Amino acid sequence: MSQPLAERLRPRTLDDYIGQQHLVGEGAVLRKMIDAGRISSFILWGPPGVGKTTLAQIIAHKLETPFYTLSAVTSGVKDVRDVIEKAQKGRFFNEASPILFIDEIHRFSKSQQDSLLGAVERGVVTLIGATTENPSFEVIRPLLSRCQLYVLKSLEKDDLLQLLDRAIHTDVILKEKHIELKETGAILRFSGGDARKLLNILELVVEAESPGESGNTIVITDELVNLRLQQNPLAYDKDGEMHYDIISAFIKSIRGSDPDAALYWLARMIEGGEDPLFIARRLVISAAEDIGLANPNALLLANAAFDAVNKIGWPEGRIPLAEAAVYLATSPKSNSAYLGIDAALDLVRRTGNQPVPLPIRNAPTQLMKELGYHDGYKYPHDYPGHFTPQQYLPDELVNERIWHGQLSPAEEKLVERMKNYWGERYEK
């Protein structure tokens, strides 16, 4: 059985590698390290199909060092330790460290990531991780601090056209088929900057055309690509990559209060074999980010949908997902909590570790009491309405406003209550 086109065309050298010139072009940071023959541990962050795995393999081949691969989807802590032990035993003195490539490293649990720390720190292995998720959220801080982070970009139009030309004229199978690339708009649009998806679409379209249908030449047009992908709407995604474009449309439809569109994109994901828990997680995020305080029940319902899907699975799980999607889409919207925490994080980064005011510090020891910890604290429940004014922000930030209520019936009540409590502070 023939390998898929994407695998047959996988580059073996940096000269054949398409895209990411900011990393591997002449004089770029990764190119310099590779040419010097020594690399440090790093993580490649970028969307699917932009060459993360290929780049790791090229590096290992160029450095002529042992190359171990683990998938975060199927590997456990024991697999990590086995590979590290194998790497340790097989390494000769002064030889470059073996490369351990971990695909989808964001799926590793904390304990799995912890098991890598010692080996990476001691240089037993050089870690190359690949992830489609922001490493700041998905990779533990000690591991992230031991790795450089390189961001890969979606391939540009010229990169994709170069790849199509290479496929048609150099691939051992396609070059025998007399293919004419008459139009490229549809194939580029459907690929979304993903090289693997681009080649899968090309292969699908070519395989569906027999020479008898269009003479001796297969003429690829936008109409033909659209036709073949409608007949096989999921065939271009043979590797089961997450449908980031569709999940984006789903979330934006909810945010835009369009329940019909939300249900449509939900159905597309269900038909495409999407992981139901992935959909459910995104609903929980949407409830907090986009509906927020305008309807706090949205988060409760989204979380309940997540639990229900986890318990009942497919096909019945489609029903709580649909219920949550419609409820979120038809709910009033507010992103004040989302904007508030981002504003607070920005304030913390700009102002550093401001001291906690003495009255609201904890005072578990006599020494702390003598130093004034907790002194002057007013217990709100001792006052009418369970409120009394006192300072909670650090001295330097006492006049800062972080949360700003938005215009929705539920949130306006919250703003009004804050005005009653704090007066002018919440008038701004």
Image: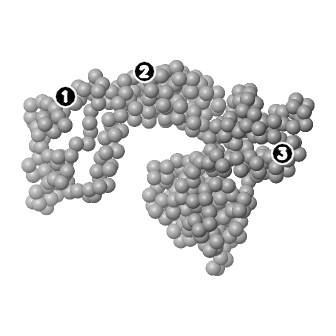
Residue 330 image label: 2
* Residue 250 in picture, x, y percent from top left: 52, 30
Residue 409 visible (yes or no)? yes
Mark 2 residue element: helix
**Labels 3, 1: front one:** 3
Q: Which amino acid does label 3 sit on?
A: Leu
Q: What residue type is labelled 1?
A: Glu
Report which residue position mark 1 lands on: 416
- Measure how far apart labels 3 and 1 are at the Cα level: 68 Å
**Labels 3, 2: front one:** 3
Residue 93 image label: none
Residue 389 is drawn in which quadrant?
Answer: top left
Mark closer to the chain start, 3 or 2: 3
Residue 323 visible (yes or no)? no
Question: Looking at the image, is 136 positioned above or below residue 378?
Answer: below
Mark 1 residue element: helix
Q: Is residue 105 left or right of residue 331?
A: right
The mark total stands at: 3
* Residue 205 in picture, x, y percent from top left: 78, 35
Mark 3 residue element: helix
Question: Looking at the image, is 197 positioned above or below residue 69?
Answer: above
3 and 2 marks in contact (CB < 8 Å): no
Image point (49%, 31%), residue name: 251
* Residue 290 in picture, x, y percent from top left: 40, 32
Image point (56%, 27%), residue name: 266
Image point (19%, 48%), residue name: 393
- Measure how far apart labels 1 and 2 are at the Cα level: 25 Å
